[in-house]
Image (cartoon, coloured by chain):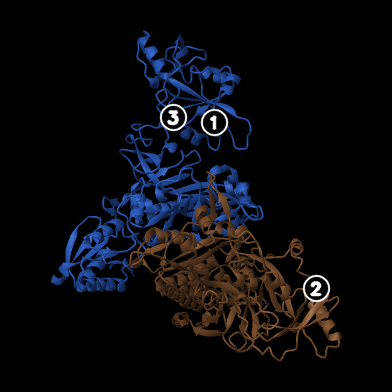
Chain colours: A blue, B brown
Amino acid sequence: MITRMSSLFLRTLREDPADAEVPSHKLLVRAGYVRRVAPGGFSWLPLGLKVLRNIETIVREEMDAIGAQEIQFPALLPKEPYEKSGRWTEYGDSLFRLVDRKGADYLLGPTHEELFTLTVKGEYSSYKDFPVMLYQIQTKYRDEARPRAGILRGREFVMKDSYSFDLDDEGLERSYQLHREAYIRIFDRLGLDYVVVAATSGAMGGSASEEFLAVSSTGEDTYVRSDTSGYAANVEAVVTPVPPEQSVEDKPAAQVHHTPGTPTIETLVDFLNNADMGRTFTAADTLKNVLVKTRMPGEKEWSLLGVGVPGDREVDLKRLEASLAPAEIALLEDTDFAANPFLVKGYIGPAALQANGVRYLVDPRVVRGTAWVTGADKPDHHVVDLVCGRDFTPDGIVEAAEVREGDPSPDGKGSLVAARGIEIGHIFQLGRKYADAFALDALGPDSKPVRITMGSYGIGVSRLVAAIAEQYHDDLGLVWPRAVAPADVHVVVAGKDETIAEGGERIAAELSERGVRVLLDDRKATPGVKFADAELIGVPTIVVVGRGLAKGVVEVKDRATGERTEVAVDSVVEHLLEVVRR
Amino acid sequence: MITRMSSLFLRTLREDPADAEVPSHKLLVRAGYVRRVAPGGFSWLPLGLKVLRNIETIVREEMDAIGAQEIQFPALLPKEPYEKSGRWTEYGDSLFRLVDRKGADYLLGPTHEELFTLTVKGEYSSYKDFPVMLYQIQTKYRDEARPRAGILRGREFVMKDSYSFDLDDEGLERSYQLHREAYIRIFDRLGLDYVVVAATSGAMGGSASEEFLAVSSTGEDTYVRSDTSGYAANVEAVVTPVPPEQSVEDKPAAQVHHTPGTPTIETLVDFLNNADMGRTFTAADTLKNVLVKTRMPGEKEWSLLGVGVPGDREVDLKRLEASLAPAEIALLEDTDFAANPFLVKGYIGPAALQANGVRYLVDPRVVRGTAWVTGADKPDHHVVDLVCGRDFTPDGIVEAAEVREGDPSPDGKGSLVAARGIEIGHIFQLGRKYADAFALDALGPDSKPVRITMGSYGIGVSRLVAAIAEQYHDDLGLVWPRAVAPADVHVVVAGKDETIAEGGERIAAELSERGVRVLLDDRKATPGVKFADAELIGVPTIVVVGRGLAKGVVEVKDRATGERTEVAVDSVVEHLLEVVRR
């Protein structure tokens, strides 16, 4: 196939668009792949649509290869199933809602768990029908608060979402692994540099959820990885290594000290080190107790929760939230302190909390035998050498403390470093949440109903175009990996001479006959303009047909390496076939 | 490729769905191609999606072949461009409107004239850039008052919409013809029985608009065709043949008669035939004058309009509307009669209308020299022998009278018969409506701006699945034409014997290796169930591998003709390859 630039609907831009911040956005607009139509809404111009379709094809092939079956749902969906699952309200402002001419409520689907569950329930009923994996490649909608970075975070985007339905946990694990392997093949074929990060701490059991992040400094997702091993995880999913327990026998007794004017960790440590106590304290020796309130979904009443973390760390609310999920958490208001006078701001200790029935969870570092400086539950007083397991016994542990670069890697190998990535895939063992909501059962061999367990798996297909562009570009423009490039070979006719134009046409025609996708620059433009556009557009192999043709040679340029080779015009098609198939 | 029914996400139904009225809806649901998700919203199950994709591919190939370039817009669109074109309000309740989290107005695109116009304006500026043709295959939304007939009239559907941009009328005509020819190739390849009907009376110039209708008794669109020639047209587009003018000299003078109690044509004709007038009158001899009011878009004031049609015909408001477009029309209310006392209900004649400055248009049959019985503008009085061109001179002619079966065909060949069809395509010379709205100009060779002229062209891609099913089915199920069938060959393993299963597998594998798309019924089900499903699903060629295998034969059945052939198992693959490629 030959795409002629003389008639291609394409105008490249020399300037970056004013609203673009990240390289992929700048280059995809400048090279004429996409255009902005609305906040978070883009049109795909011919070259962009080719890249998008190439990615879709790879995703489809790998999904088919694991036995997943493609179907397609509407994007415009009735409210009822989403009300039943709770997502109609849970999604909040991120859900596009609308009302039809008859006053019925509708939404634009963000993902389709509800519909897939209902459809499987509608078709299947026997244990013999399972397992089944279904997917769609479909336009999705989310009313993002801040659509950004072009197609990296749009409000209308293309997603592959798939769902697995199994009779038991082993089946779910199998479906999950099939998807995991398919995703690895997909992202490998796309040439991406990516990491698979644990997305939950594993409280729900093993690899309940993992994210695929394309490594990129412009990514929105922060993750940590070991500087030594292959360990990588979402910050929310980092499991703090637990130090060994210590004996409580040989520790000095707890002592309450008058520590006037020390409501913060910093003032406290200063005070202690200025007092003549015969030893030096650091913030890590203190136990900071933070109060929040929590409630489970559907509950009306909030309960107080105390969270104890080493004083050198802040509580990371996203980590705390992930640890306590599905419970909601909220910060305390003044009225809460007023209603609970035992909470002495700045001087809260475990004693008053537990005496007043407040659940008290601590950081995993707070193990039996560790001694802490913490609040003594009255103004201007702290207790020193309060020993865990002797002077107080927490109600449990919680991952709430911030993760920092330099922290030991949870796998025991090396230290953590922070990195940024673009979420391109997410695999998730849903379990029975939706099966419960819609009573999705299969009749077992014993004629008893078996509740189905589900997985959901997503790939941001349109986002991948931008993620690849983030990793594959240079100062001059895009540098597509061959698997997704809008063409295999970019033939540039460089010169006004009729024979040069004919030479370009002939090479393009021969390549096309051999199944090579050719972009032919047959425009009336200067070689300089054509070269700049070829670099910008980023087809992997560029053939310059110019003055050398008189001597029987053309120039073949590798867009990625910049390497130029003079090739005899008689053998250039064979040469290019080899390059393309490499 | 082999699709195995043992794992295919498919459950066929023996009963018609309760809400289905037309055969395509019943069969597509029963055979497991689609499922209803919401009013006018359907999901595509695996077999349905295959058919839809096959159609998309044919449409894409033919659009590419005429040089149209594929791009893709969002479905969620900002209000502003549609406000500028007027369609934000013109579309009325049929437009899905919504508000985003910031309170901005959005819509779900019904078609994309505005966005294509703006995009071309954004990229192109010189006359050298034109012509250009762009298209998309995309999900569209219309809040139909009565979604019906399954995917024939949904609220979310797949459409191919394309747009041509030309510098002049000749260019537009060329782009229009290119589309017309592409549409003919597409619908021919799909095996459809269809007609191309004139969609407007040609007042805007020649073939300004044509519709492609799949012939179907269940279609929503009524059209007329000649019983003799190839003439076909929308009822709105029928041009009434004009009878020859007559001399006004030899006609008797007009006489006003007292015709008490004759406010209707029927009572009038009865009265006249009972009066001793020496001749017989029919309704066709009377001239019925109907009053409406009209105004042009943007006007506030309504004007009265008198429409005179032969008394044996009703005024067809859709035809009148099409004739007067873009003017709005409305029926008169009592207040209008009160405000215009010269309008004597039941006895209105041309005289009072024209004396009071009311525009008066007549049916094309009312030519010079024709004599009429019509109202005398006072109660209980009519005038007989009122001769056009002698006693009154209309302000013009108008196509407003109903079209009836038996009317002479406008091309002079035969009579009209009414027929029904499903609109599957529409090609339309838009002209400069949108170019004017968005000031889409190209700088001409003389540096003066040239206003672009546009065409818009649509194909109902998802509707085609149903339109084809309407034409290709029988009592037992669907009977797909090969070009769109979900598979080429349906291999039925009919028997529990291990060798039979192996035989089926072998044939399927060999066919698949040779590029044939195979649906393999490898389920544990009785032959009866499998045969019924094969008929219902409608793959064009069915191979039954059963007991005959022991004797070295299998049965090949043509789904359409029902013809069965015993074929030696050794040569069946070659035989089928020939059938498939035929």
| Residue B117, numbered circle | none
Residue occupied by mark 1:
A330
Tell me, yes or no, if residue A25 can be seen here: yes
Q: Is residue A111 above or below residue B11?
A: above
What secondary structure is marked by label 2? loop
What amino acid is found at the position of numbered circle 1 in the picture? Ala
- Residue A37 x, y percent position in the rendering: 45, 54
For the residues beneath circles 1 and 3, the answer to whether they share a chain is yes
Say which amino acid is labelled 2.
Answer: Lys
Image coordinates for residue B385, horizontal then vertical, percent: 75, 85
Q: CA distance from mark 1 to mark 2?
A: 83 Å
| Residue depth check, mark 1 versus mark 3: number of the one nearer the observer | 1
On the image, numbered disc 2 is attached to which residue? B378
Left or right: residue A564 compared with residue A20: left
Kindly identify which residue carries mark 3: A401
Tell me the crowding category of disc 3: few under 14, some 14 to 19, or many 20 or more residues within 10 angstroms, Cα based.
Answer: many
Dot 1 or dot 3: first in sequence order is 1
User: Between marks 1 and 3, how big is the CA–CA gap?
Assistant: 16 Å
Q: Nearer the viewer, residue B105 or B166?
A: B166
Q: Where does residue B243 sit, x and y in percent of width and height?
A: 64, 87
The answer for which chain carries disc 1 is: A
Q: Which residue type carries mark 3?
A: Ala
Q: Residues within 10 Å of mark 1 (few under 14, many from 20)?
A: some
What element does badge 1 sit on? strand
Give the quadrant of the N terminus of chain B.
bottom left
In the image, B406: left or right of A241?
Answer: right
Choose between B397 and A521: the one closer to the eye: B397
